[in-house]
Amino acid sequence: MRPSIDRLGELLRATPPKQVERGPATRVAAVAAVLRERAEPEILLIKRAVHPRDPWSGHMAFPGGRQDPADVDSVATAIRETREEVGIDLAAHGRLLGTLDDIQAVWRAQRVDIVIVPHVFRLDAEVTPAPDPSEVDAALWTPLGPMLRDETRTSFAYRHEGQDLELPAWRVGEEVVWGLTQRMLEGLFGLLRREGVGT
């Protein structure tokens, strides 16, 4: 069975997201997992620009970033960051399908006091991403199905404190999706697999 964006929306609405406990100093970030309808649904991924102060520099990711005091909530953060990073206005051309479980940020295997809220959107217009080169090296649409069916499953070699680790990942063209974004996608795929989609 192929994944359906409409069915995913139903599953998200029926599954309250789990929230990570937040302290007074916890920072909140939000990302937008943007889907568009094709013969097989596609999801938008970005390659973050290389920046010495960014701990996730050069990684494959979803558009997003830290919550600004002017943002009314994390949905507003995801919408603003997507507009700034790839030039897609989800407020005008998309709709919110739901929210996945919070993700505790981790860097070099250490917990960081940042909680990431992944929001899932459907894009309802033909809009071409226009990446801001100061933040994004590339933006690409990739089919959900091959990842969901583990056809592009791979591993990412990571060295931590003298140990060589093999972390779960997916190939996307010439790139590899691993780490926080891989965990978010697993959360999305978990909903679909419970329905027998992609199996």
Image (cartoon, rainbow, N blue to C red):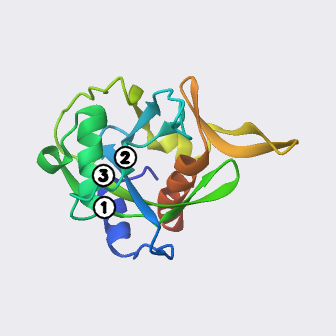
Q: Secondary structure at mark 3?
A: helix
Query: Seen from this angle, which residue lies furthest right?
Result: 162
Q: Secondary structure at mark 1?
A: helix
Q: Are marks 3 and 1 in contact (CB under 8 Å)?
A: yes
Instruction: Tell me: residue 1, above or below residue 57.
Output: below
Q: Residue 40: x, y in percent?
A: 38, 40
Q: Residues within 10 Å of mark 2 (few under 14, many from 20)?
A: many
Q: Residue at x 61, y 54 (%)?
A: 106
Number of the label disc, if any, that sits on residue 78: 3
Specify which label sits upstream in the sequence, 3 or 2. Answer: 2
Q: Residue 51: x, y in percent?
A: 50, 29
Q: Are marks 3 and 2 in contact (CB under 8 Å)?
A: yes
Q: Which residue carries the number 1 mark?
A: 74
Q: Residue at x 27, y 29 (%)?
A: 129
Amino acid type at mark 2: Gly
Q: Quadrant of residue 166?
A: top right
Label 2 vs label 1: CA separation? 10 Å
Horizontal side of residue 97 vs 101, given as left or right: left
Amino acid type at mark 3: Ala
Specify which label sits upstream in the sequence, 2 or 1. Answer: 2
Q: Secondary structure at mark 2?
A: strand
Horizontal side of residue 112 vs 140, given as left or right: right
Q: Which residue carries the number 2 mark?
A: 64
Amino acid type at mark 1: Ser
In what quadrant of the picture does the C terminus appear? Answer: bottom right
